[in-house]
Image (tube, rainbow, N blue to C red):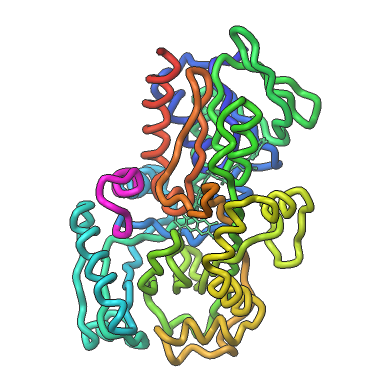
Amino acid sequence: MYDVAVIGGGILGVATARELIQRQPRLRVVLLEKERDVAVHQSGHNSGVIHSGIYYAAGSLKARLCTQGARAMRNYCESKAIACRDAGKLIVAVRNEELPALDELHRRGIANGVEGLRMLEAGEIREIEPHCRGIRALHSLRTGIVDYAAVTRSLADDVRAAGGEICTGHAVMRVRTGAREIALRCANGAEVVARRVIACAGLHADRIARLTGDDPEPRIVPFRGDYLLVKPERRQLVRGCIYPVPDARFPFLGVHFTPRIDGAFWLGPNAVLAFAREGYRLTTIAPRDLLETLTYRGCHRLAARHLRTGIGELYRDVVRRAYVAALQRYVPELTLEDTLPGPSGVRAQAMRPDGSLVDDFVFSGSDRTLHVRNAPSPGATSSLAIARYIADEAHRRFTR
Ligand SMILES: Cc1cc2nc3c(=O)[nH]c(=O)nc-3n(C[C@H](O)[C@H](O)[C@H](O)COP(=O)(O)OP(=O)(O)OC[C@H]3O[C@@H](n4cnc5c(N)ncnc54)[C@H](O)[C@@H]3O)c2cc1C
């Protein structure tokens, strides 16, 4: 019997398994991942940005864990020689109505202890990004880029080297809770028994929580984000990250310009309700996932409130010219011909029955289980700090 079984081989599950073994080297830890490798879902399909901690309300878990996590991520990458660099970032206002929100981001960044923040006037924007236009911008020097799939694989190596087991191809389907143990029945027929369970199941977080008797709410609603690629010969249009001022009604940051650590340049992601939890294309439909979404009253309420925004987002998803037009507000020289269709990611976004999208990181559980219920962006940036938080929380709950 294992001491702890971790469900989910994304960056959070692997970082958590590593943190647990580092704290208690004799702990018997197993990690169960349904895919053939780690980092197959969100952790391998994201913008690759190390966020500095600007956006998050003071006192929130995101504010605390993002700033701590960004520091830990840089140190980890340095110690393992994983490529990572500060690309810098501009959050650009293009309309006067956006200025109060931009000022608020500046205040939040300072309150969260973000270093290297400066407000720029229109002329100064061009000194940083010669092709970018805006009326004012918040410049963050300490926004970095990294390949989170590479980080996850390295963390998995650490787990194995410390004696932990990582079992890929193990999809947890059923959970039986006994007096002293929890048995996890996997789709391949294996039964894994542990005294405690920590679930970092991303897009399936609510389902795994329900299997262990945890609250069914909040639910996970999948939001797909499609990227465009900038053709290699046009990559010099932009130097670092360029983000819009986000729409405060949603927890998404808006389509942005992001250099990748491998030299590529991505545009996006947008945010479209997906018809499958792991649906990386518009046409991918999983009947169970779609039915759950369509019958969930939270989704009805979200649709009633934001139908126009949703339709606009879907239109830009299908009509690439419209997608590029949204980006041209920041870099007018970008043309449709400069872009190619790119990859996609699906965000595990928690939603409440009233249709509101959960903003902060959320954890739940009992004295034997602990669930990550909402860990969208900046979850990858924060992963090493979240792992510490989970290990502290597990210690508190499990030794009650
Ligand atoms: C488009 C996009 C852009 C983003 N950009 C950024 C960014 O720039 N910076 C940033 O910090 N964050 C970003 N994020 C967020 C970041 O990717 C996530 O916060 C992070 O990857 C969450 O990690 P995770 O381990 O919780 O989830 P995941 O990586 O999704 O891992 C969950 C794992 O659980 C496994 N699993 C599920 N059910 C079972 C089961 N029954 N049995 C066994 N295994 C199971 C899945 O197969 C999966 O591997 C972005 C996310 C998306 C989608």
Residue 120 lies within the magenta run: no
Residue under the image location 30 percent in, 49 percent down: 63
Expressed as whole percent of the image width and height from the top left, the position of residue 215 reads 56, 32
Q: How many marks?
A: 0
Relative to 282, say whether 82 is above or below.
above
Expressed as whole percent of the image width and height from the top left, the position of residue 399 reads 41, 13
Relative to 376, say whether 230 is above or below.
below
Residue in the foreground of this view, choosing between 384 and 203: 203
Range of the magenta residues?
54-68
**Residue 174 visible, this orientation:** yes
Expressed as whole percent of the image width and height from the top left, the position of residue 266 reads 52, 72
Residue in the foreground of this view, choosing between 2 and 313: 313
Which of the 4 image quarters holds residue 300?
A: bottom right
In the rendered view, does 398 fall on the left or right side of 43?
left
Residue under the image location 55 percent in, 29 percent down: 160
Q: Quadrant of the N terminus?
A: top right
